[in-house]
Structures are given as structure tokens and as C-alpha cells.
Image (tube, rainbow, N blue to C red):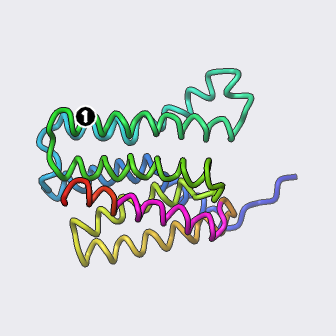
Amino acid sequence: MEQKKSFSEKTALVLRAATVPPTTAAILVLVLCLANTDVFRSWLDVAATVFFLSVLPTLAYPISAAVPKLRAKGRDGQRDLAFLLSCVGYIAAMVYSTAFHRSRGLIFICSIYLFSVLLLLIANKLLNLRASGHACGATGPLLIGIYYFKALGFIIAALIYALMLWASLRIKRHTAKELFFGTGACVLACVLAWLCVYM
């Protein structure tokens, strides 16, 4: 018989689901729109960003459920397809933002996502560091929030980040080391994006 989950476990699962990369990317876009930042020049920018950063990676789950060969791979198959579609989405977002000469802010954000996925590939496939994609994907929007909203952004980001860490450790989805490497990959991605876009 499956053991009943405790309140803290249920809370951790909810927090974990709320901080998956597609969700945090969509929330980031919404917040930047509501704050009237200069990131998005049109509703097409908004729609394209949400589609490439949020919708496309999420399609991995219905696709893996619908395709028998992928369904047979279970959770690992879902993760692999989600990572692949994330790569495609982030590259497409970068192409859109640069080819159509969108705002520097949007190019900066798309650069962070692209560098993040490239650094995760290097960390996980070449260096075998097992960097957490969840931590990396959650950290990006939080750092962008700090960049745009300064002290208020820092306070909110610190709270969300702490909850994300606690949730991941509570349900044992990642180790502290994996979370550290995932966070580090995103911080480095932000630095590289800043150097490429603003320097």
C-alpha cells in the first residue's frame, strides 16, 4: 500500500510544480508585461516568447504520453524530450529576438535561456556534474526579476529560491550538489548574456 504523503511533502510537490522552467518563464513574461518594462515591443513579442520558452517545452508531456515508444521510457523519456524541446525553443527564441531586431531586454532574456541550456549540456553530458535543470530554469527568471525590480525583486527572488530549494530537497528530486551546479550554470549564463548584449 502506498504510504500517505505528509502535508510537507504535498506542499513541496506543489512548490516544485510551480517552479518548473516553463511555468517560471511564463510568470516572468506576465510580470514584465504588467510592470510596463521596455522588454516587449508588441503582443507578438509576448506570444512568441511564451510559446518558445514555455509552451514548446511543455509539449514534451502530451507528446510522450501519445507516442508509445516514448511512453514506454516513462519519466526519463519525458525529461529527455522536454530537454530537447527546450533546446529547440530557446534557439528559436534567440533567432526571433535577434533576426527581427527586438529590444535589447528581450535579446538579453533569450540569451540567458540559450546559454543556460548550453551550459547544462556541458555540465551534464561532458563533465558529468549532474546539474539540476530545475534549479537552472527557476534561477534565471529570479535573477532577471532582480535586474528589473532591484531590492523588491531581490526579496521576492530570495524567498522563491529558498522555497524551491527546500521543495527539491524535501522530496529528494535533487541533491544539494545538483542544485548548486544548476544554479551556478544559470548565474554564469546571465554573466555571459550580459557581456554579449550590453558590453
Left or right of 41 in this view: 84: right
Which amino acid, by three-letter code, is at mark 1?
A: Tyr
Q: Please tell me which residue is depicted at 38% across the width and 49% down the height of the picture.
A: 113
Q: How many marks?
A: 1
Compared to residue 146, the image places residue 78 above or below, namely: above
Q: Nearer the viewer, residue 70 or 190?
A: 190
The residue indicated by pointer 1 is: 96
Q: Quadrant of residue 189?
A: bottom left
Q: Nearer the viewer, residue 148 or 103?
A: 103
Left or right of 117 in this view: 98: left
Residue 95 drawn at (x, y percent) = 28, 34
Q: Please tell me which residue is depicted at 57% across the width and 34% down the height of the picture.
A: 81
Q: Which residues are magenta?
A: 174-190
Residue 54 drawn at (x, y percent) = 40, 41
Q: Please tell me which residue is depicted at 63% across the width and 28% down the height of the picture.
A: 65
Let me know if residue 21 appears in the view: yes
Residue 170 drawn at (x, y percent) = 66, 69
Label 1 sits on a secondary structure element that is helix
Residue 165 drawn at (x, y percent) = 55, 69
